[in-house]
Amino acid sequence: MTSSYPPIPLKVVTPFPCRPLLPILPPNDPLNYPSLPCKLREPRFNASFNLSTHIFPAAYLRRGPDLPVPRIPPPSARKPERENAVKSVHKTFQENWNNSSVKNSKHEKILWNVVNRYVRNDLDKSTSTGITLFFAHANGHTKEIWEPVLARVLSSPLAHMIDEVWTWESIQHGDAGLINSDHLPAFFDWSDNARDINNFFLHFLPSNALDKSLPVHLPRVSVQEVEKRLCSGFENRTLITIGHSFGGTSIALGAVSHPKLFSAVILIDPVMIDPKEPPVLDWALKGAMKTLVRKDTWESKEQAYVEFSSSPYYKS
């Protein structure tokens, strides 16, 4: 008796070309480097790995118009007022989507990404395997969403094979969203998250995991090291990337653009839709509008926990 499901025949899908990514370069120094918005903490699990949090500049030159983030009336406002505001945003998005000059525009704002690093406490040159795990979150989540997974992975009998783990945070999520809050544009192109991830791999990921104490602001690797990575990937790392939904799509785009950087790609429910299909806009706007009317402020952590715990979606 088998414990697995019978294989499902794969549907043959006609490939469609990916839109090329914009150049993957960080902005020029010197920059006004921000501070972390929250104090450093210990991981929420017991494992022989040390946690640290780091900041670095996102890829320079962003897709989309530099329009301000729409302001929606607070949850305390009357329902018709909130509904009318959302309808107005919906109309604006549709108009801009159909305007090629707006949709194809770019802006030069300096934005920031944040990552968590988990490095093995007893790591040294003699025990290093080079295995590096990289996790990218889904839309609406943060880098800490992976800690329940890490609690199991890093306490398993095979944890000694892992040198370090990095968990990703997109520019408009979590700590990165707090840092960028005054500069976020209304439009965000998912391909820019792919560029930001590859920007980290090319320009900021250290050559190996042996340095257990890294500065909050990750230094750039040398130009020579960047060229080496572009040509042949990492010399001392086996980079295994895991992405969920939005994170999976971003990793897939990055791997198509720079396959030599990736040793393995694991995609969990990645969103991959032919951009020429008309339903794409409707699907994207439906999710965006639901997000705009969703409650995002609570009086306390305890109140937030109670409400999330009672939600059929979030309590799982």
Image (cartoon, rainbow, N blue to C red):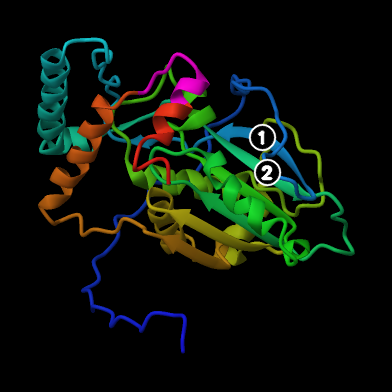
Q: Residue at x 46, y 89 (%)?
A: 1
- Say which amino acid is labelled 1: Thr
Dot 1 or dot 2, earlier in sequence: 1
Quadrant hosting residue 9:
bottom left
Q: Is residue 271 above or below residue 23?
A: below
Quadrant hosting residue 66:
top left
Helix, strand, or loop for circle 2?
Answer: strand
Contact? badges 1 and 2 (CB < 8 Å) = yes
Crowding near the residue tagged with mark 2, few <14, some 14–19, many ≥20 C-alpha atoms within 10 Å: many
- Say which amino acid is labelled 2: Arg
Helix, strand, or loop for circle 1?
Answer: strand
The answer to whether residue 236 of the structure is visible from this angle is no
Crowding near the residue tagged with mark 1, few <14, some 14–19, many ≥20 C-alpha atoms within 10 Å: many
- Residue bearing the label numbered 1: 53
The answer to whether residue 294 of the structure is visible from this angle is yes
Q: Residue at x 76, y 52 (%)?
A: 209
- Range shown magenta: 296-304
Q: Answer left or right for 175 relative to 213.
A: left
Q: Answer left or right for 43 relative to 82.
A: right
Residue 119 on image: x %, y %: 75, 49
Residue in the foreground of this view, choosing between 305 and 133 = 305
In magenta segment, residue 303: yes
Q: Residue at x 50, y 36 (%)?
A: 58
Q: Is residue 280 above or below residue 70?
A: below
Residue sitting farthest toward the bottom: 1
- Residue bearing the label numbered 2: 117
In magenta segment, residue 261: no
